[in-house]
Amino acid sequence: MRTKTLANICLLSGCLVFPSTACAQASSFDGAAIQEFLHRSCEGKNAGMVIGIVDEHGSQVFGAGKLDNGTDDEVNGDTLFEIGSITKTFTVLLLEDMVNRGEMKLDDPVEMYLPESVKVPSRNGKKITLLNLAAQDSGLPHDGTNMVRRIPNNMFADYTADNLYEFLSSYTLTQDPGASFRYSNAGIALLGNAIERKTGRDFESLVRERICTPLHMDSTYVSVPPELKPRLATGHLDDGNRHPRMILQVIIPAGGLHSSANDMLKYVSANIGLQPNALTPLMQETHPIRHAESNDPVGGLRGATAMPWYDDRAYQTPDMDFRGHAGGTAGAATFMAFDLKRRRGVGVLSNAITNRSPGIGWRVLQNASLEHTDIATAMPIMEIVGIGTAIGIDSDTKALRILSIVPNSPAAEAGIASGQIIQKIDDTETAGLSLTDCMKLLKGPAGSKVRLALVDTESKEPKSVELVRKKFLTSS
C-alpha cells in the first residue's frame, strides 16, 4: 500500500555490471547465507525480519530481531506481521472463487454490485469490469482523490465506503479501462467492496472461510484475535519509532491482512502446486501476464504484471518464471514471490518499513548473493539497457550532471568522468528539461547509439561523445 519514491538525483541511465553467475542455477536455497544475512542485519535490534523458503525439498524459516511488543521475544515463523498489499492477491483469489461458484463474472461491470447512487466512471463507452479491477488496469488512480489524512501515518483511517463512492462519482478516467496497468489501492478496495456486497459478508470472514481454512492457514486475520496478539510484531516507522497498527476501513481488501511466514509458505506452496489444493487451479488463473511491460512511477512497479502479481523486472534465466507481490504499511515491509517453472517460493516479513523486503526476496529467489547486501537498500538483479551513467539535476545550476559511472560500461570505456555536465543528448539541449525528459532521451534499444555533448569542470567547451547502448545486470 505504501510506496517509496526514489530521489530524483539518482535515477540510472545505466547499471552495475554483475558476473554471469549472479543467479546461480542450483535448485535449492542457501539457508546458511540467509541466516548469516539476518544475523548481520537484525540481531539484537528492536525490529526484525523473517525469511521463509520452500521448494520440492520442503520449507525452512529463518529469523532475527525482535517483535518489540512489550516482550524480548525474537521473531520467528509464527510471528504475525502486517502484510499490506500482499492482501490484494487474496482479494483477487476471492474473485476467482466467486466466479468459480457462479456468483460473479469477470466481465461484469462493477457498477452491478454497487448502490444505484454511485456513478462509476467510464471512458469511450468502456465500463470498468471486475477483471479490470483485479488486473489493475481500470484506469483508477493509486488512491481516491478525496483522501484526507487526519491521523499521522494512518492515511486510510477515516476512509469509508461512502468516501470511496464519492470519489468514484466525481472521477474522470484518463485512460480506457484495460488499456494499461495502473496500480490502485482504490481499485482493489472497490473490488473487495463489490464482493462483500454480493455475498452480504465481510472481507475477513470470506478470506478465513474460502482461503485460510482450505489451506490450513491458522494465523491469517484482519483483526488479530486476543490469543494470537502475543505473537504480533510491533511496526516501526522510517525514524525507528513504533507504529502499533494500521487503521483501515474500506481499504482493508487492498492491505488489511496480518499473517506469518509459516502461513505465507502454505499460500506460496498452493500457488505453485507443491501442496495442491482445490484453490490451486483458481490461483493459476491469476498468474498469466496481462501487461508485458508496465512502468508505474506512483505505484513503484515495473515489468510484467499479472492479476495482481508482477515480476518487477527481476532478472530471470529462460528456466525461470517469476511472480511476486510486495506489501508495505507505515510500520512493516513484506514480500512474497515464487518461480512457476522451478516451483520455488520465498516470503520475507519485517516489522520495519525501512527494510527493503522486496529486494531481499527477489535476490533469494534468484539465488543471488546476500554477502554484501544492505537490508535497507537491497535490490534484485535486473537486466536493463543503458550507457552506464547515473544522472541528476544540479540543485544550484539546474544543469544535467553525471553523478557516477559504472565500471566496464560504454561510458567508462569512453573515458567519461562523473561530475561532467551533459549539455546535449543527440541534438536536444538539456537546459530546462526535467530529469524524466532527459531519461527518456537516453533510453533506447541495445546496439543503438546516443551522442552526448559534455562539459567538464575545467573546460567550458563541449566535447561530443558517441556511445552504443548495451545490456547490463544490475542491482542498483
Image (cartoon, rainbow, N blue to C red):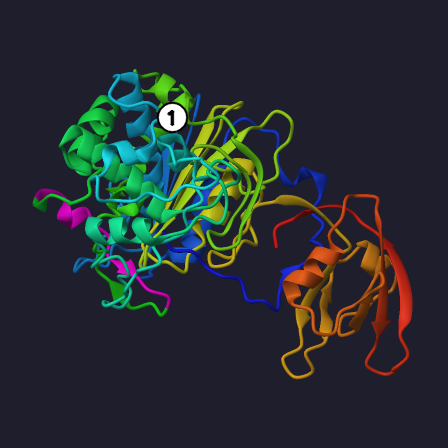
Q: Residue at x 35, y 43 (%)?
A: 187
Q: Position of residue 182 (x, y in %)?
A: 47, 45
Q: Is residue 55 magenta?
A: no
Residue interval drawn in magenta: 227-238
Q: Given the image, on which type of amino acid does mark 1 rest? A: Asp
Give above or below for 247 relative to 273: below
Q: Residue at x 25, y 48 (%)?
A: 165
Q: Work out whether residue 68 or residue 90 is closer to the camera in this orientation and state it.
A: 90
Give above or below for 286 relative to 7: above
Instruction: Find numbered disc 1 in the image and state the secondary structure of the residue it sits on.
Output: loop
Is residue 102 in view from this perspective?
A: yes
Which residue in the protein does label 1 denote? 107
Q: Work out whether residue 51 or residue 35 is closer to the camera in this orientation and state it.
A: 51
Horizontally, is 85 left or right of 137 in the view?
A: left
| Crowd class of label 1 (few under 14; some 14 to 19; many from 20; radius 10 Å) | few
Where residue 227 sits, quadrant-wise, is: top left
Q: Is residue 236 magenta?
A: yes
Where residue 278 sits, quadrant-wise, is: top left
Horizontally, is 297 left or right of 183 in the view?
A: right
Where residue 275 sits, quadrant-wise, is: top left
Q: Residue at x 33, y 64 (%)?
A: 237
